[in-house]
Image (spheres, rainbow, N blue to C red):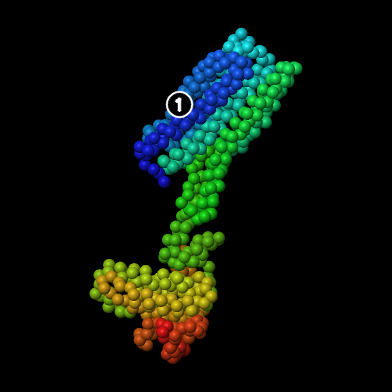
Amino acid sequence: MTATPGAGTDRDSRTILRRYYLAMAVPFGIDLLTSAVYAGINDHPLSLLPLTTISATFLLVGVGLGAWLLIRPIERFLDGEVAFANIEPALASLPWRSATIVACLYGPMLALRLLGPRAGYTFGATIEVSAWIDTVCSFIVVTSFNYVLTFFVVSAYLDGLLAFLFRTRGVNINAFRGAFRRKVGLAVLFVSFAAMTLLAGDIASYEGDRLLREASQDLLASVVGAATIYYWISRALTLPLARLDRGMERVADGDLAVRLPVTSDDEVGRALSGFNEMVDGLAERQYLRDTFGKYVSKSVAAAILDDQERKGRAADTLAEATLMFTDIEGFTSLSEHLTPADVATILNSYYAAIVPVIQRHGGVVNNCIGDGLLASFNLPLPQERHAAAALDAALEIQKTLAAVRFPAGVQIRTRIGLNTGPVIGVTIGTSDWLSYTLLGDAVNIASRVEQLNKQFGSVILATESTVRAAGEGFSCVRLGGTGVRGHSGEVVVYRVEPPA
């Protein structure tokens, strides 16, 4: 996720830093527009020059210097001079510190403009002197407007800056000392009382036509200001929420690679950080499930990982199942003539050929010991026609092996034994070692039936219970009853042949 800084990244770094200066210049742009309107209303265009000069002195030179001091730590991080942990406080406090600088410089500039006419200097325009109450109200509202505006403009910029740092440097802020409610409260408080304060100052200061004129101008200014503030508030507050919403949609679609930049130090930032931790946990869980499922069946792995009581074991399950044992014919003599590495290669190729066949027919591979394999159908993975599925899998295994050419020019034949009966899936072992296995007389019979292939010269043998459970559609030749070791009584077996 972390990108190595290069020429392109350096150019992007310079661009993202320049955007901060543009964000800090927004109050100057608005003031320039306001000064133009002021000059137009009073029909004195020459007043625009002194007004712009004063504004440039305070808002371009003064604010520009303050902006350089605030952005300098971030620039040093991008240049590799300091660690990210050292600039986290500067990042988190960037909006309110930027707003404070603007307010501290805009306040004196506005006071100069408001008090200038009382000293006889009207900036080249013939205007009436404002009453003291109106002057104080205007000073409070306009200075507050620029503070609030700068706060949310820089907050929106900070969202983009932190997204850039996450994308190019792989870093996220981890300190959450802010409060989302304070940001909302600041916005609501200003929008609610700004226009009311200006109108109250007009009413307390003027009468007649002057009151109507002043009130109309202030009302228009309040509407424009509220619209401007609303735009930047909505961007600053909704950008991270929209990003979080899109991230949740991607996770719902199964994308566990998504990670989000943490772009604020409040509850929303904490939610974004929590989202990343949640996806990390889901990805780790999926990795464990996939990896665990390569050592035990995925259904067993899922049962263990999904256990709400966190016992670390799958619940014991009793069911009728069809068991399949496979064993490579002549594997012992084969191992004598090959190196262990060659034997391992052949076994990997062998299992790569037959395991997908078993899984494709709904079976679960429970255990592999050397060249021997135990698979089950209907436990732990439920399956209606498990006996028929096991017979289909056995026939396809033989067909698949006949077409495979194994390493070292070896041709492999495997013997298969099938039996259907009641078994229990249990987790056995100690507190430090556990194994999921299938127990029951049916498992023992399936193992012995596989060995009977040597006696009958067959490659697939199935007990009568399996043949009956599978139903019609299979070519099965009854070989009669035979005794099996570890089981009292005879077991009737059938040779299963491929369809004609």
- Please name the residue shown 57% across and 34% down the image: 232
- Please name the residue shown 43% across and 76% down the image: 393
Neighbor class of circle 1 (other Cα within 10 Å; few <14, some 14-19, many 20+) is: some
Q: Is residue 336 left or right of residue 162?
A: left
> In the rendered image, which quarter contains the C terminus?
bottom left
Q: Is residue 255 depicted above or below 160 in this figure?
A: below
Q: Is residue 126 depicted above or below 157 in this figure?
A: above
The x and y percentages for residue 39 are 59, 17
Dot 1: what SS?
Answer: helix
Work out which residue is located at the far top of the displayed protein and give it.
120
Residues 7 and 330: in front is 7
- Please name the residue shown 34% across and 75% down the image: 403
Q: Is residue 185 depicted above or below 393 in this figure?
A: above
- Please name the residue shown 47% across and 58% down the image: 286
Residues 425 and 465: in front is 465
Residues 9 and 435: in front is 9
Q: Is residue 255 depicted above or below 382 in this figure?
A: above
Q: Which residue is mark 1?
A: 68
The x and y percentages for residue 41 are 63, 18
In which image quadrant can residue 136 be found? top right
The x and y percentages for residue 255 are 48, 53
Q: Amino acid at mark 1?
A: Trp
